[in-house]
Image: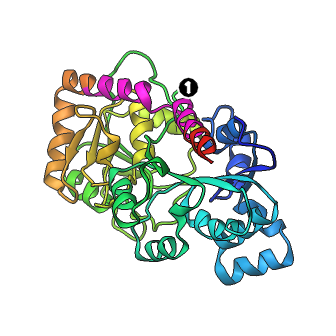
C-alpha cells in the first residue's frame, strides 16, 4: 500500500520482541496481525521493545510518564509521515506530537475510548479534527465517537477482529470432544465458571494467560475446584489442540463496553468448536446470531445449563460449531482484517 512519500510505521503497544522470540522457538505458530500490517503498509515496526534502546530522554520519559508516552515520543522522533497504531494509549500522545508535523497522517484501533481519562485527552486534543481514522471493534465505541466527540463518519469505521484461519483450523470431521476449555485473561469471570461447573463431573481446562493483557489472573489465590485443571506455558500448537479436543469452549466475561474475549472466541470458532459466551455488551457486535450460546454475565446457573445442553446434544453442538466456523471464514480472517484497515487508510489518504 502506498501512503505517500516518507517513512511509515506500525506502532505496536506491546513487547513485540518478546512475542516474536517466543514464537521463534515453536514449530508452528499463527501469523501476527502487526507483522501482516507492517507488510501491507511497507512500514517499520515500533513497539515497547524499542523503548529501552531509545535515547536517555526516551528512557527517562518511560519512567516518568509511562511506556506508551515514551513509545509515542520515539515514534515521532523517527520522522514518519504515516503511522498506524494498534491501540489508542500510544496514539493519543503521538497524535498530540503530530500536530507539529505538517502533512502527517495516522490511523489507529480504538479499543476503549470511553474511559474518563481518554475522553478528556481526546477532546482536549481535538483528535478527530486531524488527518486520521479510527477503527473499532464494537458499536458502543463507534457510537461514542460519533456522539460524544462528533467524529465525522468518514473518520470512524467499525471492523471485525481477526483470527489466523490458516493456523487455527478444525482437526478434521466434527467430534463431540471432552470437557470444557476456557482461555484468556482480559476481564474473564473465572469465579462464575468455577461456580457453574464445580459440582459437575465435567473436566475443565483453564489457560488464564495472555501475551497482551495486564489484568490480574482471576484464577490466582483462589480455591480451584477438583474438576478444574489450570494450564500454563502452552505453545501455539498445544493451545490449538486444547481447543480442538474440547466438547465446549466457554468464554466467561465481565460486562464491559468493548470486546474483551474476542480472541479466544474466534480461535475456538476457527477450530470448529461450539462456544458458550457471557453476553457482555462489548462482545455482542462480534457475534452473528446463532453462532454461539449466550448466557447472562455472572449467571452460573445459565452457564452450567448451556454447557450441559451442548454436551447432551452433540447434533446441536455440531450445528453451532459449523455456524461459528462459517462466520469466521466469511469475514473475520486475518487477511480480511488487514485488507479492511489498508482500505480505510487508502480512503483517508485520498481525502487528504
Give the residue number, with chain letter if any, for mark 1: 166
Magenta stretch in the rendered image = 320-343
Give the percent coordinates (x, y) of residue 120. Answer: 46, 77
Above or below 265: residue 185: below
Give the percent coordinates (x, y) of residue 288. Answer: 29, 34
- The residue shown at (66%, 66%) is 94
Residue 348 counted in the magenta span: no
Q: Nearer the viewer, residue 338 or 157?
A: 157
Query: Where does the N terminus fall, quadrant-wise?
Result: top right
In the picture as drawn, the residue positioned furthest to the bottom comes out as 64
Left or right, residue 295 beside residue 124: left
Residue 29 seen in the figure:
yes
- In the picture, residue 218 is in which quadrant? bottom left
Left or right, residue 131 beside residue 332: right
- The residue shown at (58%, 61%) is 130
- The residue shown at (74%, 70%) is 73
Residue 85 seen in the figure:
no
Helix, strand or loop for disc 1: loop
Q: Nearer the viewer, residue 14 or 275?
A: 14
Above or below 62: residue 345: above
Provide the major secondary structure of the magenta segment: helix
- The residue shown at (47%, 73%) is 123
Q: Nearer the viewer, residue 74 or 156?
A: 156
Amino acid at each position: 500500500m502506498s501512503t505517500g512519500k516518507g517513512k511509515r510505521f506500525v506502532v505496536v503497544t506491546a513487547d513485540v520482541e518478546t512475542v516474536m522470540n517466543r514464537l521463534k522457538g515453536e514449530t508452528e505458530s499463527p501469523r501476527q496481525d502487526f507483522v501482516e500490517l507492517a507488510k501491507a503498509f511497507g512500514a517499520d515496526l515500533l513497539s515497547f521493545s524499542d523503548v529501552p534502546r531509545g535515547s536517555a530522554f526516551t528512557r527517562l520519559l518511560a519512567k516518568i510518564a509511562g511506556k506508551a508516552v515514551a513509545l509515542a515520543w520515539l515514534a515521532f522522533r523517527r520522522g514518519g509521515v504515516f503511522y498506524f497504531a494498534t491501540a489508542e494509549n500510544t496514539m493519543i500522545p503521538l497524535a498530540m506530537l503530530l500536530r507539529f508535523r505538517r502533512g502527517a497522517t495516522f490511523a489507529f484501533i480504538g479499543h476503549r475510548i470511553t474511559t474518563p481519562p481518554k475522553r478528556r485527552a481526546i477532546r482536549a486534543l481535538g483528535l478527530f479534527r486531524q488527518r486520521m481514522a479510527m477503527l473499532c471493534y464494537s458499536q458502543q465505541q463507534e457510537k461514542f465517537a460519533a456522539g460524544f466527540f462528533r467524529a465525522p463518519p468518514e473518520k470512524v469505521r467499525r471492523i471485525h477482529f481477526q483470527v489466523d484461519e490458516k493456523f487455527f483450523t478444525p482437526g478434521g470431521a466434527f467430534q463431540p470432544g471432552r470437557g470444557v476449555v476456557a482461555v484468556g485473561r482480559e476481564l474473564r469471570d473465572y469465579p462464575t465458571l468455577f461456580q457453574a461447573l464445580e459440582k459437575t463431573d465435567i473436566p475443565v481446562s483453564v489457560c488464564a494467560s495472555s501475551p497482551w493483557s495486564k489484568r490480574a489472573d482471576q484464577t490466582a489465590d483462589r480455591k480451584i475446584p477438583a474438576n478444574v485443571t489450570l494450564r500454563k506455558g502452552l505453545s501455539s500448537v498445544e493451545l490449538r489442540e486444547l481447543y480442538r479436543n474440547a466438547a465446549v469452549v466457554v468464554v466467561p466475561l465481565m460486562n464491559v463496553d468493548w470486546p474483551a474475549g474476542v480472541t479466544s472466541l474466534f480461535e475456538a470458532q476457527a477450530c470448529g468448536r461450539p462456544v458458550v459466551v457471557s453476553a457482555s455488551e462489548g462482545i455482542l457486535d462480534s457475534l452473528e446470531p446463532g453462532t454461539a450460546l449466550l448466557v447472562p454475565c455472572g449467571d452460573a446457573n445459565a452457564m452450567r445449563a448451556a454447557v450441559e445442553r451442548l454436551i447432551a446434544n452433540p447434533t446441536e453442538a455440531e450445528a453451532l460449531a459449523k455456524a461459528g466456523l462459517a462466520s469466521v471464514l466469511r469475514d473475520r480472517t486475518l487477511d480480511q482484517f488487514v485488507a479492511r484497515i489498508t482500505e480505510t487508510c487508502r480512503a483517508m489518504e485520498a481525502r487528504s
